[in-house]
Image (cartoon, coloured by chain):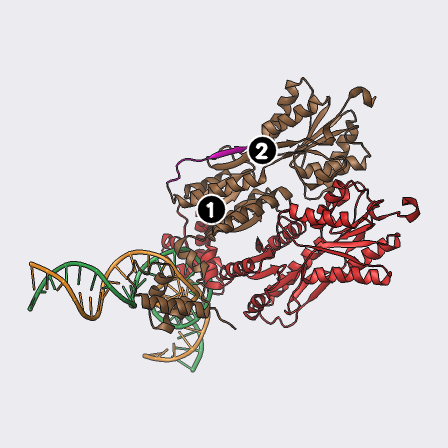
Chain colours: A brown, B red, C green, D orange
Amino acid sequence: MSKKVSIVDIANTLNISKTTVSFILNGRAQEKRISEELVARVLKLVKEVGYKPNSLAKSLRTGKSNIIGLMVEDISNPFFANIARLIEDRAYEKGYRIIYCSTDNNSEKTRDLITMFRDRHVDGYIMAPPREIEEDVKELINAGLPVVMFDRYLPGVDTDYVVVDNEFSTYNATKHLAEQGYSKIAFITFSSEQSQMLDRINGYKNALKDSKLKPFLKEIEFNRNEALIIEPLTAFLKKNQDIDAVLFGTDHIGTCGLKVIKQLGMNVPDDVAVVSFDDYDVFKLYSPPVSAIAQPIEALADNVISLMLKKLDNNAANNTTQKITLSTNLNIRESSLQHSKTAAE
Amino acid sequence: MSKKVSIVDIANTLNISKTTVSFILNGRAQEKRISEELVARVLKLVKEVGYKPNSLAKSLRTGKSNIIGLMVEDISNPFFANIARLIEDRAYEKGYRIIYCSTDNNSEKTRDLITMFRDRHVDGYIMAPPREIEEDVKELINAGLPVVMFDRYLPGVDTDYVVVDNEFSTYNATKHLAEQGYSKIAFITFSSEQSQMLDRINGYKNALKDSKLKPFLKEIEFNRNEALIIEPLTAFLKKNQDIDAVLFGTDHIGTCGLKVIKQLGMNVPDDVAVVSFDDYDVFKLYSPPVSAIAQPIEALADNVISLMLKKLDNNAANNTTQKITLSTNLNIRESSLQHSKTAAE
DNA sequence: TACTCATACTAAACCGATTTATGCTGCAAG
DNA sequence: CTTGCAGCATAAATCGGTTTAGTATGAGTA
């Protein structure tokens, strides 16, 4: 039907060369000394027939696409979904489109996606990298492609990133629990070798050490099937009845944790105090409201996209990398307050 | 650095033509009577240097991309994020990649995205369409491109879609509230001319008519800034103190509604019973747990992607369109139970 | 007159693939 | 001794743009 018009159609209609049309459309008419009269005629026709250059062909030639590839761990996770949305907005304002994909923390899938992004000529890569992807990322960087990471970074790869101060965040939250009089403080999280999780665990351990308390660390294997998270969580809480406070490592495990706590009929904060990493509606609306470590997602998104745009501007010559660490906010709510050992007994 | 190898490099290295390489890599070696020995040599080299055909160039030539464009209203909304994720998974298994974008319910942005998808040669379009996009969608369909809609449809456009039975869902939920003895039942939702919302409103109205009750319909303008939703919501609930039950039209407004209810110190369900469209953790974990209309998102995603794959297989010859309506599940929880007028007074 | 130079525009190469049409053997059949 | 065809491989066109390297024309100048 409405066969899309190409630059050749425009050129033929006006009996001129497609080169001329291309120059005019790319704002190089003056530089190429094309008469104003012809420029006007071309622009008129272009508008009339609604011609839009095919960006695929354009990319093939120029290597540029005005598209930024964004890889998150899982778009159905509110943290990533919100960040993705904010990044998309900022990029859109600057004339860049975003295409996103979930890596599922699967390095093979990620490699696949990198390849797809790469030969679709995306201009830049924003990613929350999975493990074992160092080599592939290095290759991108060596090829001169801008890469910005967020949420976590790859220790072996020198690239720009924006993360939060994970270690201090959990240190601070754990300290808070200790100060409220809790003494058997567990840290429950997904097992992971990634930087953000190692830092969170360190913060927790250091705080306990400083408070001279014993750690109760429970790492749970991530699984898309929630039942397989709930199960070990339930077992852990049942087995360690003496635990009086729990710090959850992410919003997802925090949500699962609340489900378990509710199911077991445990009272918050009397039976168990709760603090979770990430701060979302579930925590704010829970009864009692749950204390949470809020990540500055707007600032995160802003910094990520600023870094990326800066790298895209300085075509080449990006010698220095920027590593940005933002601080979080511990929102203290009833779920972790007013514990008095004697009152409970 | 590691300049990507192209098909020409492969051909030159072996002193053969790139045509031959192309045939071999596309499994047309036998058909083209290329000797097994040569096939083996080519495949060996390809593997050695890790050559991957540039899919941009491939698409330019073939018009195919193995990419499906997915447009949701807002990826930060859990309903859309979850659907997007499921669709992505299913598509990935079948060898298709998904690229998603948020339309923001903005027809201009959507048009822009359609153009981008189109000249990136995506093979199919899955969308939750905004208003005023009929003409653009018709153009896609006329050009023979597969389009599948979900969540809502465009009454003026004959295309495949998968939706839920919105009208019955709210009818049923409203009836449930009426049967529990509530008599001043409000329906609070975002104002919208879209099919799904009109159906939901109709269901609510019909149920009230059948129960001989008076409707209290409150439509709120959507805004990304939550404060601007909370404000009119608060005003409405404050002004209509006699309302004893509320049905929320979407998960988002339901969540905002709970915040307001909590802030106003209203008791659920004694002061006000609550049911919301969509069923997420926030509702399950609320105290008391909130009754909700659960959309079958897995089935939704399955149907959407099946329809799309079917259309992609039957290249051309897609004369009939399929319109699928799935049913929802009313999960009744404490937030809408055990109302007795006398007990409250 | 012959040689620049500015002006206005274009032919052809190129990006990296696919696909169509074709070439070149050598052997069996007519 | 052609003709036909099977077997193997390729040159060239194509997709829709951008970019390089020119060309044609007329005016200015030594």
Query: Viewer-proximal residue, B42 or B150?
Result: B150
- Magenta segment main secondary structure: loop
Amino acid at circle 1:
Gly
Residue A62 visible in the shown view: yes
Residue A322 located within the stretch drawn in magenta:
yes
The answer to whether residue A145 is seen in the rendering is no
**Residues in magenta, as a range:** A317-327
Residue A309 vertical position relative to residue B114 in the rendered view, above or below: above
Q: Which mark is residue A196?
A: 2
Q: Are marks 2 and 1 on the same chain?
A: yes
- Left or right: residue B1 versus residue B178 is left
Residue located 45% across and 66% down the image: A51
The residues tagged by marks 2 and 1 sit, at their Cα atoms, a distance apart of 23 Å
Q: Which residue is mark 1?
A: A124
Question: What is the residue that sits farthest to the top in this orientation?
Answer: A212
Amino acid, disc 2:
Gln
Q: Is residue B66 left or right of residue A42?
A: right
A101 or A16: nearer the eye?
Answer: A16
Task: Please provide percent x and percent y for residue A177.
Answer: 70, 25
Q: Earlier along the polypeptide chain: callout 2 or callout 1? A: 1
The kind of secondary structure element at disc 2 is helix
Report x, y in % for residue A285.
73, 40
- When asked about the image quadrant of residue A279, the answer is top right
Are there few (<14), some (14-19), or many (20+) residues within 10 Å of tag 1? many
The residue closer to the viewer here, B334 or B99, is B334
**Is residue B246 shown above or below B309?**
above
Task: Find residue A217 and report its image quarter.
Answer: top right
Where is residue A95 drawn, in percent x and y?
47, 52
Q: Is residue B10 left or right of residue A113?
A: left
Q: Numbered disc 1: what chain?
A: A
Q: Secondary structure at mark 1?
A: strand
**Quick check: B172 left or right of A167?**
right
